Amino acid sequence: MLHLFKVYDITNAQVKLIDPQYRILKNPFQWTLQRDTFIRLVLDVGPNLRYFLDGLTPFSLIARHSTTKLSSVDIMDVVLAFENPTIVSTQEGPKHVQTFTFVDKEKIPISVSSWEEMSIFKDQYSQKLLKLFQW
């Protein structure tokens, strides 16, 4: 579970092209968090914060990293909107999915889908703040 205003290291999130018929944003990419995605709270960014911020990848450059599973990028964004979790039928059976819209410093939106048991924002404080961002 993620909390607003915290820094996280997210590993093994899948970046893929969204089929145009399902695309709701101009950005053609979707970031998918699945069961094997690792999310770690960064407890101390203190003196390393400037180095951390300088190494961030804007959404406009994510396409360069979508061609290989070995690619890794660091991004920073803000939650603009989120949808209520829904159940989607898949070949493996029904799965829960929740979609979020994030925007980075270039004001480029990206869709992030959280699949299966992962509920990103569970605490009441974050839920209340996220409702403020809903359009």
Image (cartoon, rainbow, N blue to C red):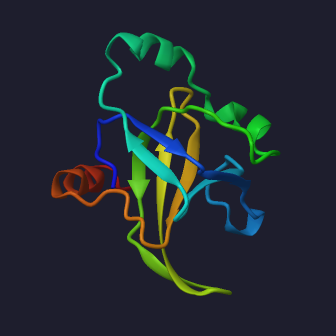
Foreground pick, 65 / 81: 65
Residue 58 % position (x, y): 61, 29
The residue lying at 48 percent from left, 73 percent from top is 116
User: Residue 111: x, y in percent?
Assistant: 56, 53
In the image: residue 121, left or right of residue 129: right
Of residues 96 and 131, the one nearer the viewer is 96
- Comparing 119 with 82, the one in front is 119
Question: Going by the image, does 70 lie left or right of 97?
Answer: right
In the rendering, at what x and y percent does residue 121 appear? 31, 57
Instruction: Identify the residue shown where x is 27% and y is 56%.
Output: 131
Total label count? Answer: 0
Residue at position x 56%, y 27% in the image:
106
Q: Residue visible at 42% across and 72% down?
A: 117
| Occupied quadrant, residue 45 | top left
Query: As drawn, which residue projects farthest toward the right?
Result: 67
The quarter of the picture where the C terminus appears is bottom left
Residue 47 in the image: above or below residue 135 = above
**Quarter of the rendering occupied by the N terminus:** bottom left
Q: Where is residue 123 in the image (x, y as percent from the top left)?
A: 21, 57
Give the farthest residue toward the left.
Answer: 125
The vertical placement of 11 against 131, above or below, is above
